[in-house]
Amino acid sequence: MPRLFSTALMVAIVGGGGWMFVKGLHLEDIQQILVASTGSPPPATGRFNQPPPTGGPAALPQPWAPDTNGTIKIASFNIQVFGNAKASKPHVIDTLAQIVSRFDVIAIQEIRTQDDHFMTKFVTRIYQLTGRRYDSRVGPRLGNTRSTEQYAFLFDVDRIEVSPSQVYTITDTDNLLHREPMVAMFRVRGVPENREFTFVLINTHTDPDVADDEMDALAKVYSVVRRQWIGSEQEDDVILLGDFNTAIPAATSGSLGRRGRSLTPQDLFGLGQIPGIYPVVRSEPTNVIRNKIHDNILFHHPSTTEFTGQGGVYDIGALHGLTLDQVKQVSDHLPVWAEFRVYESGMPGRMANRPPLPVSPPR
């Protein structure tokens, strides 16, 4: 029986010198989230006023260049037990660096290391190997067991900017989520002011034993984050992505889904009850042995009209010339991705009101 979402999921904000908590926040009757931070709030225009990075060596030659057709790629990747053991294998860490370099922003799950500089070393390796300059935001260690995990967001600093006062972790006072989601707000660089695509990412990893219950809780989290006011604006482009651990058995028809159907929004439990919710991955398996859909990217389709209709599962083996055994050394999951236009489709500070564009099937 699903657990009742009886009390608040509260919000913890990363700001300057530490975590700051918003107290007494109740989901049942909340109208908005009051955000506290040691940093300055972003201005009403939604721009973050961070200068682009300067200095450093010239970019090295890279095997893959970011899109120049006015789009960005956002991805999610559960890098199974991502820590020192993988970092000690050059062929594995270099493959991971190459994979990340295919995307402008990527949410990572299942980081397991006590090294507080681990992600800094990883983004340095990405630069050495590909020439792309990334930065990271890493969350606290989370979990109900001794084997805790961290979330992270990695983003190309030449294309993407993070809001310093809008990076936070949901705090679950009733322990309804084993690993509370990490949230961050981003915008695209190099686009005229007030026209840049701004968006909020919610990075999540459910517990497989209680995934159904946690999906119900995530529906509440998603609704609360969408109602959050940032300065004088309400961000309409809220994207939930990660490893949802939805147990979807293989179908004899060749597609995947519950009871033999392709995956639909209704299969996503409480999240599927949100009108307009759209899963990018619907029928293609996301695990390496290709029999389950666990990873996904979801957003409110009527609002996020910046989505180009392109997205799906990133086939590590085919795209990097690896055998199945070699791919398994990288992770037991495959990355999932979606493409978005760099220009904001809706009015700044308001819900997008343009009709959605035709959507092609995910690749």
Image: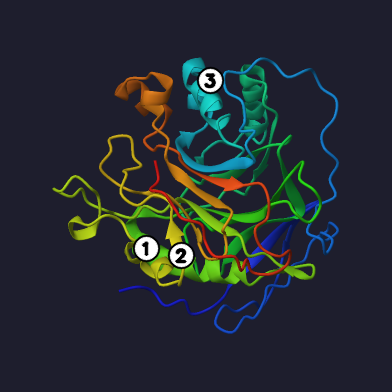
Q: Quadrant of the N terminus?
A: bottom left
- What scheme was used to colour the molecule? rainbow
Residue at point 52%, 42% (across, down): 75
Secondary structure at badge 3 equals helix
Q: Are marks 1 and 2 in contact (CB under 8 Å)?
A: yes
Q: Residues within 10 Å of mark 2 (few under 14, many from 20)?
A: some
Question: How far from the left and from the top, in percent, is residue 102?
Answer: 55, 31
Question: CA–CA distance between discs 1 and 2?
Answer: 7 Å
Residue 94: numbered disc:
3
Q: Nearer the viewer, residue 97 or 67?
A: 67
Q: Amino acid at mark 2?
A: Ile
Q: Are marks 1 and 3 in contact (CB under 8 Å)?
A: no
Secondary structure at badge 2 equals strand
**Which comes sooner in the sequence, label 1 or label 2?**
1
Residue 358: numbered disc:
none
Asked if residue 176 can be seen in this view, the reply is no
Question: How far from the left and from the top, in percent, is residue 295?
Answer: 41, 48
Q: Nearer the viewer, residue 3 or 263?
A: 263
Disc 2 target residue: 277
Q: Nearer the viewer, mark 1 or mark 3?
A: 1
Question: CA–CA distance between discs 3 and 2?
Answer: 35 Å
Residue at point 61%, 42% (across, down): 71
Question: How far from the left and from the top, in percent, is residue 215?
Answer: 41, 64
Instruction: Kindly give the residue lying farthest to the bottom in the view shown.
Output: 29
Residue at point 45%, 72% (across, down): 275
Asked if residue 172 can be seen in this view, the reply is yes
Disc 1 target residue: 265
Q: Nearer the viewer, residue 46 or 303?
A: 303
**Which comes sooner in the sequence, label 1 or label 3?**
3
Q: Nearer the viewer, mark 3 or mark 2?
A: 2
Q: Amino acid at mark 1?
A: Pro
